[in-house]
Each structure stands twice: as structure tokens, then as C-alpha cells.
Image (cartoon, rainbow, N blue to C red):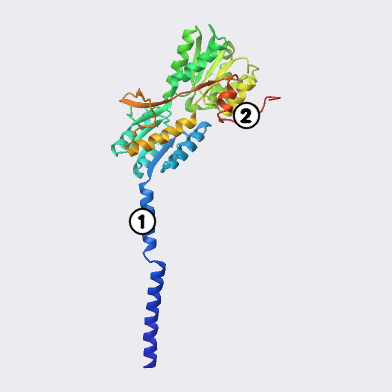
Amino acid sequence: MGKRRFYILRVITSLLIAAFLCTCSGCSAPAMETDSSNKEKTDKIQIGMCFDSFVIERWQRDRDVFVSTAKELGAEVNVQNANGDPLKQKEQIEYFIKKGMDIIVIISIDPEKIVDSVKKAQDEGIKVIAYDRPITNAGADLYISFDNEMVGEMMGEAFVKSGLKGGKVVMICGPLTDNNVPMVRDGFTRVMEENDNEVLDIYYADGWKAEAAGDYVYSNTELIEEADAIMCGNDDLASRVVYALSEKRLAGKKLVSGQDADLEACQRIVEGTQLMTVYKPIEKLARTAAEAAVAMVSGEELPVDDIDEYDDGKKIVPYLKIETVSVSADNMDEVIIKSGFHLEEDVYLNVPGK
């Protein structure tokens, strides 16, 4: 009997202790915390961002500013890098659709490859922003970029200001799959025609590959020697062009233009081997795009006063246009150094006594 009473007391004691511990620790708390966490995550605006690649220097800046701005606004960004592969980019957009993103931001590689994916996203209620490059015939919800015809005009005007009238020019552009390329080209050739400059040849570097620009210089020596100036579609192409010119002892003897204000381009400008570049305020572009993405999902007005329009071939798309600045040795300090885009010691690294 004593053993039985002892056993019963032991069982009752164990049950009381278990109940006491459960009350103190809050048995239901972990489940509630998990549910709250999941809800908080779901409630955040989800942004998918598809990059062409990070080979070009500026794209990393775009990514960092966009992501940090979106985070400040309470949104989450999933960044994907297609490494220059249009089919891979298409897969990444499809992935974002399956993930149920609220909005997708695309730096397109080849618009034709993703038109159907853009429509599919919109059919699922997902908005689409064409970032920096338009997506023709897709009817994106927003296009945000720089004034690309103005970029070309700035390149041409810089050549003219340096005395190029009645001269000869070679154009080394990016690929035609990038719809900004024809805009820059048209702005540039218009200025050339107005000043009686002859365009000897137009070359389109596939995939923005800088080595293709260098190969062009090596393969067209006579044409390059005949030209007074070489218009390069961006600073990365200009880097290989100037390198090839230096091997031919022509660096500094031919006017060379570019765009993006890459550090090495700014160095070449103050050294005298590249005439100019076009500074595009990337931070402003990325920040405005992130603000626009959040506003569009939230049903708020876009964060700008002036909205232009762009006909992408399918419909008229709202166009947020960011202004650019022509940069030469004369205004390098004012535009690049004072803005903090590059440090003075980095820009003038190879200039003695500066």
C-alpha cells in the first residue's frame, strides 16, 4: 500500500511540475512568434531585380543604391544576375513570377526574348519596370533611364568643341539588342551631320564586350588612322580602344569619347588619352527607381514632378528621365570629385604633382 501511495504521489508531482514549467515558459509563444514573423515577412513589398551582368563597373552601384533605398522604405529585394545570357534572364523573370513578387525591375539584355515573360508577369498582377534600357514591344508599366539621345549629342558636341568640323569619325557602339544604343547613335550622328563630319564606319560590339572594341581597332588600322575621332558607346569599350591606340602610338592623338564616368575613364581624361565621358547620376537613377517601385505597388504617385512618355512599340509607357552631364578635364573636379562619385586621389593617381 505504501508503495502504491508513493507511486501515485510521484505521478501527481510530475504532472504538477510539467504544468508549472509550461506556464512559466509560455508553451504557445513559439508558434505565435513564428506566425508573427511570417506575417511580417509577407507584408513587406517584394521586389525582383534582374541584372544583365556586373561586368560593367556601374551596375554594382545601381544594385547597392537600389537595394539600400528599397530597404529603407520597408521593401525586400531579390537580385538576380543573368551574366549576359538573355535566356537565363527569361528564366529568372519566370522564377520571380512563381515567387509572387509584387514588382519586377529589369535591365534587359535582349527585349525580344522576354516580351512574353513581361506579359505573363502583368497577367499575374505583377508590375514591371524597364530600368535603364527600354523593353520594346512589351508594354512595361514604367521606363526609367537617362536621356540617351542627349548622351549621344553630348559626345558629338564635345568633339565639335575640340575643333572637329569637316572631320572623320569612327563609331564603336554597343549591341543593337540594347535599345539605348540606337538613341545614343542617333543623337551623335545628328551633331556630326550638322557640323559636316563624316562617319567612316559604325561597329556594334556584341554583348558590350570591350575586347571586341580593341579587336576592331587592330583589324581596321587604316580606317582608325584616317579617323580624327572615335566615338565609344561606353567607357568600358573606350578602355580597350585607348589601349589599342597606345600600342599604335596614337593614344592622345585621336579624340575618344565614352559614357558612365568609370574611374579608369576619368583617369584617362585627366591624363589626356580620352577626351570626355558622360556622367550619369547613377545614385539618383537607382534611388528614384526604388522609390517608384514602392510607390507603384502601394498605389501612390510616382516620386517625380515631370513624367515623359516613351512609345515602346506596344503602348505609350510613362518615362522617368534623369539628366546627364558632359565631363571633360575642365569640369572633372566640379562634377566628379565634389559629388563624391570618385575620390580626387584616385582620379589623379597617374598625374604627377596633382
Q: Which residue is mark 2?
A: 344
Splitting the image into 4 quarters, where does residue 241 fall?
top right
The tag on residue 35 is: 1
Q: What is the quadrant of the C terminus in the image?
A: top right
- Which secondary structure lies at badge 1? helix
Splitting the image into 4 quarters, where does residue 328 fall?
top right
Q: Is residue 248 above or below residue 23?
A: above
Q: Residue furthest right?
A: 353
Viewer-closest of 24 and 322: 24
Say which residue appears at 35% left-offset and 34% top-offset. 128
Query: Residue 268: x, y in percent?
Result: 61, 23
| Amino acid type assigned to the residue bearing label 2 in the image | Glu
Q: Is residue 136 above or below residue 200?
A: below
Q: Is residue 56 at all visible to an observer of this figure?
A: no
Query: Residue 326: x, y in percent?
Result: 52, 20
Q: What is the quadrant of the N terminus in the image?
A: bottom left
Query: Residue 177: x, y in percent?
Result: 42, 25
Say which residue appears at 37% left-offset and 53% top-offset. 38
The tag on residue 75 is: none
Of callouts 2 and 1, which one flags the residue occurring earlier in the amino acid sequence?
1
Left-right relation of 220 to 183 = right
- How far apart are the alpha carbons under marks 2 and 1? 51 Å
Circle 1 Cα neighbour tier, 10 Å, few/some/many (<14 / 14–19 / ≥20): few
- Which secondary structure lies at badge 2? helix
